[in-house]
Image (cartoon, rainbow, N blue to C red):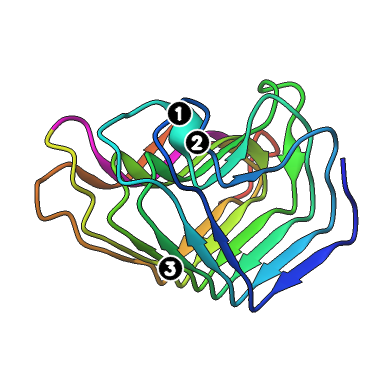
Amino acid sequence: GADYVTFRYMTLSRSGLNYYATVVDIRGGANNNIFRSNRIIGTLYNSTSNYFSLVYSNTDVDQGNLFDNNLMRYGSYGFYWSGISNVTLESKNIIRNNILDSVMTSGVSSFYQDGITITGNVVKNIYTTGAAYGIYCYYDYNGTTVTRNNVSMPNGGFGIYMNVNQNPNGTRN
């Protein structure tokens, strides 16, 4: 994966309705990359598949990546961010001060993270009428930080959903 790359003041978009409509795909051990002050625009398509995510990192170890102050619209997920398992976690990823507008299923979904920070984001207008999540954390460990987010769910759903998040060292998250 790519390491130490900065994307700033860019518009990254995906048009069309073909499957695999991800805008930013982070994989292969992509570490310490910065996405700051960009517009990340997906497709307005009625699908809950993670293949329509604005930012997608799945079953890989991508660490130390920062997404800060981005305007993000449409897609099935704003972030679909997953490590490999509860044994092989990603670490030090930060999702901060982003606006996630009109995504289908979830603003931020994180899985198998070690100390992920999700802070200062605005998640609004999630438009599915099924299971919708502003922020979804599953198997996130060791000091997961979810603070100062503003989540608006006009069609119902879970504002912040956390499941099997823990600190095995016994200190408070």
Which mark lies nearer to you, 3 or 1? Answer: 1
Mark 2: amino acid: Ala
- Looking at the rendered structure, which numbered label has been put on residue 21? 2
Magenta span covers which residues? 130-139
Q: Position of residue 4 (x, y in %)?
A: 90, 61
| Residue 132 covered by magenta stretch | yes
Considering depth in this image, is 115 or 167 the residue closer to the camera? 115
Closer to the chain start, of discs 3 and 1, is 1
Tell me how far mark 2 sits from mark 1, CA to CA: 6 Å
| Residue 161 covered by magenta stretch | no
Q: Is residue 164 visible?
A: no
Q: Position of residue 130 (x, y in %)?
A: 16, 30
Residue at left 64%, top 40%? 170
The local secondary structure at tag 3 comes to: loop
Q: Quadrant of residue 158?
A: top left
Q: Which residue is mark 1?
A: 18
Q: Which residue is mark 3?
A: 121
Residue at left 90%, top 53%? 3
